[in-house]
Image (cartoon, rainbow, N blue to C red):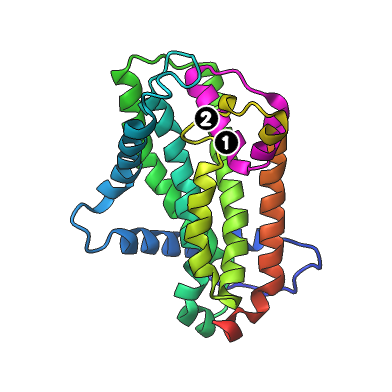
Amino acid sequence: MEYEIKPKEKFSLGLAELWQYRELFYFFTWRDIKVKYKQTTLGFAWAILQPLLMMIIFTAVFGKTFKDPELIGVPYEVFAFSGLILWNIFSSGLTSAGNSMVSNANIIKKIYFPRLIIPVSAVLVSLFDFLMAFAVFIGLLIYYHIDINISRAIIFLPLSLLITTVATFGIGSLLAALNIKYRDFRYIIPFMVQALLFITPVIYPISIISNPVLKYVVAANPMYSAIALFRSALFDKPLQLDLILISITSAVLSFVIGIYYFRRTEAYFADLA
């Protein structure tokens, strides 16, 4: 296949170019999946075990405090797992994407291709993990006899995944560009991801926050809307639309700013790698 290299438009995010190199997406994504689980005894099972073990830990710590977190008849373990499997896309995607340019330095120096493929492919690996964990989550819903609102699920499940992916692509690309220039970010990223877990309503309901101003601050997190929509789809949980809109706006801004910064700085990656 022949590729035509065109000058980038001044304010373009350059996303159309990615489709032209779609075969590289398959290559990098599948390569990263194999590398991630290579030489592990349990292999792909870790995609299920990681959120499952976190659910067990948080249930042991918070299970008695939040027996029915949203007062909708859902046990805490199901509530926690519903947030953790989405959060795992975000946390794993940010960590992998943030370090992706540094770990692929040799390839960057040798050949031309849209550098954005590397962090985006790293995020796609976390979506693969989600699919495996989601199968276990369906088993939990069946075990606890939790009925799903099909009409809401058809709309809100894809939307929640889209928001998660968009936010992770944007922030992950921003971190990848920053990390290749400022190597301190390799130490900042894990701490940042861990801190975000506890300031995002993943393992606790936003209803425990009584301060309305603080609720809006929490809603500025793009993952708030993704998790809220995901739970609404499965548990028929009512939504606070003003908070959802703030969070979705944050996700879109994260995507645009992250991709734009990456594209504006990628010309220097080969020299910095």
238 relative to 25, above or below: above
Q: In the image shown, does 53 or 32 lie closer to the viewer?
A: 53
Tell me: 138 left or right of 184.
Answer: left
Looking at the image, do the residues carrying marks 2 and 1 touch, with CB atoms under 8 Å apart?
yes
Q: Who's the residue at 55% across and 20% down the image?
A: 152
- Residue 240 in magenta? yes
Amino acid on which disc 1 is placed: Ala
**Alpha carbons under labels 2 and 1: distance apart:** 6 Å
Q: Secondary structure at mark 1?
A: helix
- Image coords of residue 273 (percent x, y): 54, 82
Tell me the residue that label 1 is attached to: 226
Tell me: 245 left or right of 178.
Answer: right
- Residue 208 in magenta? no
View extreme (right): residue:
10
Q: Who's the residue at 54% across and 75% down the image?
A: 183
Which is the main secondary structure of the residues drawn in magenta?
A: helix
- Magenta part of the chain: 216-245
- Residue 114 visible from this viewpoint: no
Tell me the residue that label 2 is attached to: 230
Q: Residues within 10 Å of mark 1 (few under 14, many from 20)?
A: many
- Image coords of residue 17 (percent x, y): 64, 63
Q: In the image shown, does 153 or 214 lie closer to the viewer?
A: 214
